[in-house]
Image (tube, helix red, strand yellow):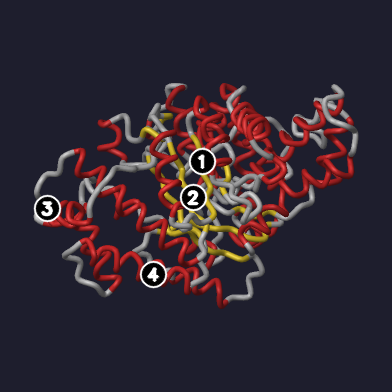
Amino acid sequence: MSKNFINDNFLLENKYAEELYHNYSKNQPIIDYHNHLSPQLIAEDAIFDNITKVWINGDHYKWRAMRTLGINEKFITGNASEKDKFLQWGKTVPYTMRNPLYHWTHLELTRYFGINELLNEKSAASIYEQASAKVNSQDFSTRNLLRKVKAEFVCTTEDPIDNLEYHQQLAKSDFEVKVSTAFRPDKAILITNDGYNEYIDKLGEVAGIEINTYVDLCGALKNRIAYFDKNGSKLSDHGLEHIYFENFTENEINTIFKKKRENTTLTNEEALKFQSAILLFLSETYHEFGWVQQFHLGALRNNNARMHRILGPDTGWDSIGDYAQAQKLSAFLNALDSKDKLTKTIIYNLNPADNEVMATMIGNFNDGSVRGKVQFGSGWWFLDQKDGMTKQLNALSNMGLISCFIGMLTDSRSFLSFPRHEYFRRILCNLLGDEIQRGELPADMEWIGKMVTDISYNNAKEYFKF
C-alpha cells in the first residue's frame, strides 16, 4: 500500500477539517470522565503478558463480531490459548468493515504499537508477536499507556460497597494522571433483582448500619456517598432502562422495603414506586455534595437467557431498548428542579430515535446558573461510532448549543480504547469543516477552532472543575 489506511488526515475530507483537527483538537489532553478501567491495575502499574489480555479479553464488542462470524466460544471466552484467540480475532477483522471495530482496531494498532499493516488472517500471527513484545514491557504498563495518550483525568466506576483502596493508593502516589471514580448504586435501586437482600446486607456492613428500614437504607447510601466524596469522587452514574418517576408516599416506600426485606414478592407498581423514591433521594444527595450525576438510559440487557446463564452479564448479549423516555424523565428532572436540587446532569441515550427527545429535554432545565448544566451526553455503546456520534452532534446542534458540549469519553474496560477520543475529534472537525466548505458556516477558523478546543477539552475541564 502506498498510503497507510490510518494517516494524518484519516476521516478529514477538506482543508478546513484538517486545520481544525491538527491545530485545535489533536494535541488537547484527554479528560475521560466515564470508563470501567480497573483501578487495581492502574495502582499496581500492571504489565500485560500479551496483546490478547489487554485488547480482546473482556471486550464484548469484539466478542459479538466473532460470534456473528461463526467462531466457537472456545476462542472468545473459552480455554483456547491467548495466541489462538488473537488469531481468530485477526481472521474476524476484515469482516468488520463498516463496523466501528474496523476503525478502532487500526487506530489502536497504529497509535500504540506503530503497526500500520492491516490486521487479517495472514498478518495476525506477526502482529500478535510484534504487539505482545511491546505490551509485555514497562513502557506499556497501565500508567504508561495512559501517559501515551496524554490522559489528564480518568474516572472509573465503582459500586457503593467498594472500599476504594486502589484509588487511595493512587491518590498517595506520584502518578501525575488524576484517577477518580463514579458512584454506581444501581444494585441498591433495582429492588426486584436477584440477590437484592444479600446486597443490602453487604451495603449495611460496609456502611456500619444495620439496614432494616428504608430510612436505614438512605442513611447507608448517604454514608457511602460521603465516603466516596472524601476520597475525591465528584460523580455518580446510573445504568437504567429509563428514569423512574411514580407518585408515592413515605409510608408506601417504608412498607415496600419492609416487604422486600421479608422476602415477599413485590408488584411491578411497588417496585417502580420504590425505585422512584430512592432515585430522587440519591439525586438530592448528589446536589447536596455538589456532584455531577450521569444517567445511561435505554439498554435492553441480558437478552439471551441461555448464554447469560453460562457466561454472566456484560459478555455481549445486550441491545438497544425502545422504552418510553420523555415523560418520566421530564417529571423526574422537574421534581428536583422545583426544589432547586437539580445538580449538574448528563443524560446518555442509547436509542437514536430518542436523540431529539434528549436534545430538547436538556434545554428545559438549563436555567442559566451553570454553562451547559444539563448535558446530552456523547453517543455511547452501540452509538459511539461515526454515524451515531454524527447524529448525536447534529441533534444537539439543532436543538441546543454544541459549543457547550463536554465531549467524548471511552466507557471502556480496555486500556487501549483511548483513540476513541481521537476518532470523535476527527468526526467533529470533519463535520464542521464540511459545513465551512459548503458555505454553511463562515471560515472563521479562530472562533470555530476555539469551539473545537472547548468541546475537545476545555468544556469538560470547566464542567467537572478538575
Pick whichever of labels 3 and 1 is earlier in the sequence: 3
- Name the front one of labels 1 and 4: 1
- Which amino acid type is shown beneath numbered disc 1? Tyr
Q: Residue at x 18, y 57 (%)?
A: 254
The x and y percentages for residue 58 are: 45, 44
- Disc 3 target residue: 259
The x and y percentages for residue 214 are: 22, 61
Instruction: Give the Cα distance between marks 3 and 1.
Output: 33 Å
Please give the label number shown on residue 294: 2
Q: Residues within 10 Å of mark 2 (few under 14, many from 20)?
A: many
State whether residue 58 appears in this view: yes
Identify the element where label 3 is drawn: helix
Report the side of 315 relative to 59 (left or right).
left
Please give the label number shown on residue 163: 4
- Which amino acid type is shown beneath numbered disc 2? Gln
Report the side of 213 relative to 128 (left or right).
left
